[in-house]
Image (tube, rainbow, N blue to C red):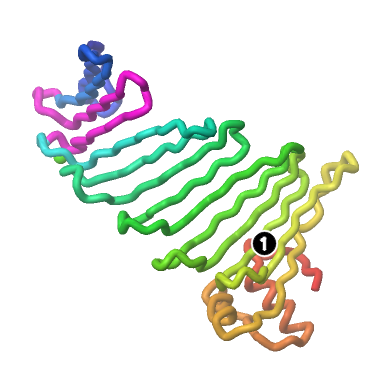
Amino acid sequence: MSLAYETTGYIVAETRSTDGSGNMTLVHRATRADGSLASETTTVTSASGLSRTISFDRDGDGVLDEVQTEVTVINGDGSRTKTLSVFDGSSTILARREVTTTSADGKTVSIARDLDGSGNTDETEVRAWDSSGNLTLTVTHLNADGSTNDEVTTVTSASGLSKTRQLEFTGSGAINATETTATSVDGSGTRRGPSCRADAPSSALERRRAKRRRPSGISPALSRTRRRRYSAAVCWPAPKRFSI
Ligand SMILES: [Ca+2]
């Protein structure tokens, strides 16, 4: 047990204990000057270290407000899958869940997020490094039926000097805009770009979604001026110049 004073004026005590099976319990208690409990956090870690439960009583009323569980499974191929679940204080109502799978070589990380505890995956994120160290990051938002709503893919070179971002916001798979950022290597550190190319919206759905991204200056027409304005709308942050 250790005692310490927090800047808030609470007295903080940490208690560690280990049961016969090797499971470790860490209790973190903050008490007020009058001895009443301000908050308490209990962390139970399994002997293997692969499973952990954290219980929060944030206001010290003796009733749990949130329970988090984190379970890691080592798969047959050497990859690891970690599932983080956040529940209400009763441990029964799921608030959100995140499942992260890391490949054995650590070069691919896939995350599936259920942002509202509905049981469906709302967002996926995949980070993949190739043998040269280039990183491809793909963030996909899913509809309730599991289909793709929109997707942004960002490729960053190993040097970090170039970045390409592709936006797809209809779920069709067709890229709606490509933004590239490059930094020169001439020694002066001059940064060029970003430049952005946005393809003209091909459907009413794309036009609506583009309009939602930035309400002004949207036009589905193909005139050069209007395509520039469309690029300005879909490329975010707004680029300084366009290549159309
Ligand atoms: Ca409470």
Is 150 covered by the magenta stretch?
Answer: no
User: Which span of residues is magenta-colored?
Assistant: 33-60
Residue lying at the far front in this picture: please name it.
Answer: 76
**How many tags in the picture?**
1
Q: Quadrant of residue 27?
A: top left
Residue picked out by circle 1: 166
**192 vs 128, nearest the viewer:** 128
Q: Residue at image x 42%, y 44%?
A: 99
Is 179 on the left or on the right of 192, as rendered? left
> Up-down: is 69 above or below 48?
below
Q: Residue at image x 80%, y 48%?
A: 183
Is 145 on the left or on the right of 42, as rendered? right
Is 53 on the left or on the right of 174, as rendered? left
For the N terminus, give its image quadrant.
Answer: top left
The amino acid sitting under disc 1 is Gln
Q: Position of residue 222 (x, y in %)?
A: 74, 86
> Up-down: is 200 above or below 234?
below
Q: Residue at image x 78%, y 57%?
A: 193
For the C terminus, give its image quadrant.
Answer: bottom right
Q: Is residue 17 visible?
A: no
Q: Can you tell me whether the CB of the residue at mark 1 lies under 8 Å from the nearest atom of ligand 1?
A: no
